[in-house]
Image (tube, rainbow, N blue to C red):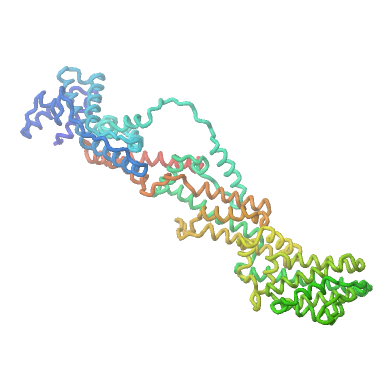
């Protein structure tokens, strides 16, 4: 025996099918059932089913004017309003629909027009009106948007095949949410069906297309999704939200994880291209320091050879009197107590006959270039790492160099030029000097081996010119120097990778999550200092900048594009909830509708996911 609700649905179905004979029988059965339930049925009673009479205005759902929500509150209010629409559509809206349908059917039976198309249209119209009058209408744009999306999910149900002897289109139309939501979707987007075609590309599209094209030239090419390419807010939100769904979102998650891994793989490829092998910072510092020391020794040996050649040729016997040296040693005598080099050079100059002393006063004496060169060596030997001594030694050597300028033969001049170049390479550039030197009064290096790369590249204490000079020395000092420069390049790239992977998060594949902000910070730091081009050349620096831009495209979404509350997952289930909760639909049919609704929705989502991934 069918229930009263089932009889009402059957009455709607018979009318839609044009079966006036069975419709009349079903109406009689409804009367009999209500009479059996001590609810005498008459035309007047039927007109007032669910409390709605033909001439009475339907009860209105109370609606109060809410204050304008803030931007943070809007998504929450929109969700609440959408749920209100669905809830009232499935309860009071459903009751209004069924009541409106029966009301219309009785009227048509009385008029004798039941079974005609015009009668069916009037019955459907009356049912929809009654349902909408008892269904809450969202006020906010976000609420209307969500309701519109649910309407899209339910829209295909009108094409269902007959179930349980009923027309699928009738049953789908009998679902209040199905009847009400498409209209509210129109309120959200009232544009006409035919619209002018959008431009194929926008400036954002052009930029991203160029970036994606360039990204394919990376050592490990990276493919964009539609949202990553266009930068479109809605498309990116769809991709990020849909990726949270279990099966349907799997291809998107896989692409995002692949992008994440590929970014790190590109940095690994850059490291491999340098040919670097060492991985410990101290080892790399030792390799760089050893290469510099080896080159410095070769240059020093060459200088000594040139001086010996000049001496053998007799060019160091030229006479010279260095008056300025005697005057400076006498004037700076009080400083000798704190600058040991002054005291040592005074004694050495007197012993070599370069300076004489009488009544406590110093004066210059005729000497040879050979004596001057010996005194110069004595200055170097007497100078320690004390800053005061270093400064005084530099003044003394400058006095000697000015006094001997232009003297001697070609071999002597060549030796002097080589010595000047040595000072420029190893003494006048703080970075190189400190890599080779030691701290005052200790055997500790001025720059510890494990800090060589950091000080050379990332420390603001040393300029880009210092790094450029270090590169020149290493790259022109044979195989050991070239190898040292490669190791330095490799360690810098490892530091870049560490900055980009400085995260405790891991993706679904177990890989560390790439941090575009960390990468951007270190790349910009190298660029702004001018050290990126020095390290990797114009082409290499350009590749790093490209990788930085690609990381922003594939890993960074616009603000609010990602909803941490899993709206996508919740919205994907709303259609199912409405179907199962809708009043007036038999449970077996609701289950079938829910399954088919999910299938239709999933098919559409899968197609959209494929499109987002650039797959056919």
Camera-side residue: 412 or 179? 412
Q: Quadrant of the N terminus?
A: top left
Let me know if residue 559 appears in the view: yes
Q: Is residue 531 left or right of residue 251?
A: right
Camera-side residue: 65 or 61? 65
Is residue 470 depicted above or below 162 in this figure?
Answer: below
Q: Quadrant of residue 401?
A: bottom right
Q: Is residue 510 left or right of residue 390?
A: left
Q: Quadrant of residue 280?
A: bottom right
Camera-side residue: 502 or 615? 502
- What residue lies at 53% left-to-right and 32% top-to-bottom? 200
Residue 446 x/y as whole percent: 65, 72
Q: Quadrant of residue 293?
A: bottom right
- What residue lies at 71% left-to-right and 76% top-to-bottom? 339
Residue 100 x/y as whole percent: 19, 27
Is residue 531 depicted above or below 452 in this figure?
Answer: above
Q: Residue furthest left?
A: 38
Q: Residue furthest right?
A: 314
Camera-side residue: 438 or 283? 438
Q: Is residue 49 left or right of residue 464?
A: left
């Amino acid at each position: 025996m069918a229930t009263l609700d089932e009889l009402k649905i059957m009455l709607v179905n018979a009318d839609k099918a044009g079966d006036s004979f069975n419709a009349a029988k079903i109406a009689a059965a409804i009367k009999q059932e209500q009479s059996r339930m001590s609810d005498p049925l008459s035309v007047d009673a039927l007109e007032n089913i669910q409390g709605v009479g033909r001439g009475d205005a339907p009860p209105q759902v109370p609606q109060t004017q809410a204050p304008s929500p803030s931007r943070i509150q809007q998504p929450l209010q929109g969700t609440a309003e959408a749920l209100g629409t669905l809830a009232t559509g499935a309860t009071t809206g459903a009751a209004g629909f069924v009541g409106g349908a029966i009301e219309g059917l009785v009227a048509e039976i009385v008029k004798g027009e039941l079974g005609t198309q015009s009668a069916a249209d009037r019955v459907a119209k009356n049912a929809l009106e009654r349902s909408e009058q008892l269904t809450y209408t969202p006020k906010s744009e976000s609420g209307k948007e969500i309701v519109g999306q649910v309407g899209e999910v339910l829209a295909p149900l009108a094409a269902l095949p007959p179930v349980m002897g009923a027309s699928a289109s009738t049953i789908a139309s009998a679902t209040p949410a199905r009847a009400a939501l498409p209209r509210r979707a129109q309120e959200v987007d009232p544009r006409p069906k035919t619209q002018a075609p959008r431009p194929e590309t926008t400036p954002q599209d052009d930029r991203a297309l160029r970036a994606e094209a360039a990204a394919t030239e990376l050592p490990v090419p990276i493919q964009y999704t539609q949202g990553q390419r266009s930068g479109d807010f809605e498309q990116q939100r769809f991709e990020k939200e849909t990726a949270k769904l279990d099966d349907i979102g799997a291809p998107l998650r896989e692409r995002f994880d692949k992008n994440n891994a590929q970014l790190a793989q590109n940095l690994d490829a850059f490291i491999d291209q340098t040919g670097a092998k060492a991985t410990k910072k101290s080892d790399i510092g030792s390799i760089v320091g050893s290469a510099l020391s080896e080159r410095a020794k070769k240059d020093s040996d060459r200088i000594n050879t040139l001086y010996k050649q000049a001496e053998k040729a007799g060019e160091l016997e030229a006479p010279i009197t260095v008056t300025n040296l005697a005057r400076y040693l006498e004037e700076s005598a009080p400083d000798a107590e704190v600058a040991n080099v002054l005291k040592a050079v005074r004694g050495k100059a007197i012993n070599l006959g370069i300076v004489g002393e009488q009544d406590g006063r110093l004066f210059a004496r005729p000497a040879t270039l050979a004596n001057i060169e010996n005194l110069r060596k004595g200055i170097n030997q007497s100078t320690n790492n004390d800053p005061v001594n270093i400064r005084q030694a530099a003044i003394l050597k400058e006095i000697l160099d000015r006094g001997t300028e232009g003297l001697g033969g070609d071999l002597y001049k060549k030796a002097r030029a080589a010595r000047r170049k040595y000072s420029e390479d190893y003494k006048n550039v703080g970075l190189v000097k400190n890599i080779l030197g030691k701290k005052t009064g200790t055997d500790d290096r001025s720059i510890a081996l494990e800090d060589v790369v950091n000080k050379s590249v990332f420390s603001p204490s040393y300029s880009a010119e210092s790094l450029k000079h270090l590169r020149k020395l290493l790259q022109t000092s044979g195989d050991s120097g070239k190898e040292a420069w490669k190791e330095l390049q490799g360690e810098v790239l490892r530091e870049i990778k560490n900055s980009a992977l400085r995260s405790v998060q891991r993706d679904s594949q177990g890989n560390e999550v790439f941090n575009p902000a960390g990468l951007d910070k270190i790349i910009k730091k190298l660029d702004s200092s001018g050290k990126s081009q020095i390290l990797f050349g114009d082409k290499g620096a350009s590749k790093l900048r490209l990788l930085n831009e690609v990381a922003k495209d594939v890993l960074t979404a616009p603000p609010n594009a990602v909803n941490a509350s899993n709206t996508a997952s919740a919205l994907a289930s709303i259609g199912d909830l409405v179907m199962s909760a809708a009043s007036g639909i038999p449970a077996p049919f609701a289950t079938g509708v829910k399954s088919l609704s999910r299938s239709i929705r999933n098919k559409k989502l899968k197609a959209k996911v494929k499109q987002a991934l650039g797959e056919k």
